[in-house]
Image (cartoon, rainbow, N blue to C red):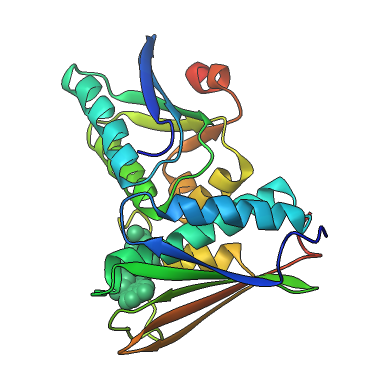
Amino acid sequence: MSANVPKRFELEIPIACDKELEATKVAERVAQEMQFGPDCVAEIKLALIEGIINAFEHSGSAIQKVLVEFAIHDEELEVVVQDFGQGFDASSKPNVRPLQRRGYGRVLMESLMDEVKYFTSPQGTRLVMKKRRPKCA
Amino acid sequence: MSEVFKVTARQAGKFIVIAVEGYINNLAGEKVLDEFNRWTAEGYRHFVLNLEKTQLVNSIGVSILIEMIEKTQELNGSMAFCCLLPIIAKTFKIMGLTQYARVYETEAEAIAG
Ligand SMILES: Nc1ncnc2c1ncn2[C@@H]1O[C@H](COP(=O)(O)OP(=O)(O)OP(=O)(O)O)[C@@H](O)[C@H]1O
Ligand SMILES: [Mg+2]
């Protein structure tokens, strides 16, 4: 991997329409540097979009930004979305029925990434997602 | 929008082919829905959505596509998708769209039914 990508770094994304794309541009570069193939790069980008728009839409944060962190490990890429909202009960997952309109974000993230975890409290929510390197062509 | 987004539509026999270019989020999805509604208002009910130039569809974008599928069902029409990137095919599969709309490799196949 080239030396110009740090092992761990953070972006501040303002809560505003389409700003999730700023994060996906960085995600794309990082994932490509890590030799993820194009389909896996797209999967990481979509999972990140879902995580960020959930933070935008549901966190109820008074602070108008979310933090996105990338950590490059030997075996995996770790992507974190941190908001400063009210938190939620992450253990109660919505059931997904065919042709239901909403409630697919978490299902998508879990299908696209190898690991998805929530750490949530009334001070905010930290979503930690991991994608393993070798599994992805 | 910070990225290029474009919707174009043309008629091919009984089908209306709607081609979408760019990231489909809530706003872009609404534009696709507007185009769709314009054609249903004129009596068309068979649609092909060509997503060759769409790189990603987020969950809110997909929810709008689901709305369109439901509308075609009400009209006894049809909705088909074509030219999907693997990530979009995977998204549609996870969200169960492929049970309600056909997916074709090419636009020509979609129009041939
Ligand atoms: N960062 C967050 N802060 C607070 N609540 C959250 C957060 N992320 C998710 N949630 C809660 O989890 C629910 C499920 O999220 P999910 O993304 O699966 O569905 P959705 O956002 O409601 O719909 P969709 O993603 O299909 O547009 C949300 O409706 C919200 O109540
Ligand atoms: Mg969501």
For ligand 1, which image quadrant applies?
Answer: bottom left
Outermost residue toward the front? A4
Residue A85, by quadrant, is bottom left
**Residue A107, percent from left and from top:** 47, 67
**Residue B109, percent from left and from top:** 57, 21
Query: Is residue A104 found left or right of B74 in the rendered image?
Result: right
Residue A44 vertical placement versus A121 (above, below):
above
Quarter of the image that includes the N terminus of chain A: bottom right
Residue A76 vertical placement versus B61 (above, below):
below
**Residue A21, percent from left and from top:** 46, 50
Residue drawn at x 43%, y 55% as measured from the top left: A20
**Residue A77, percent from left and from top:** 68, 69
Between residue B35 and residue A97, name the one nearer to us: B35
Between residue A33 and residue A90, name the one nearer to us: A33
> Is residue A92 visible from the viewing direction of this image?
yes
> Is residue A71 visible from the viewing direction of this image?
no
Residue drawn at x 56%, y 50% as measured from the top left: A25
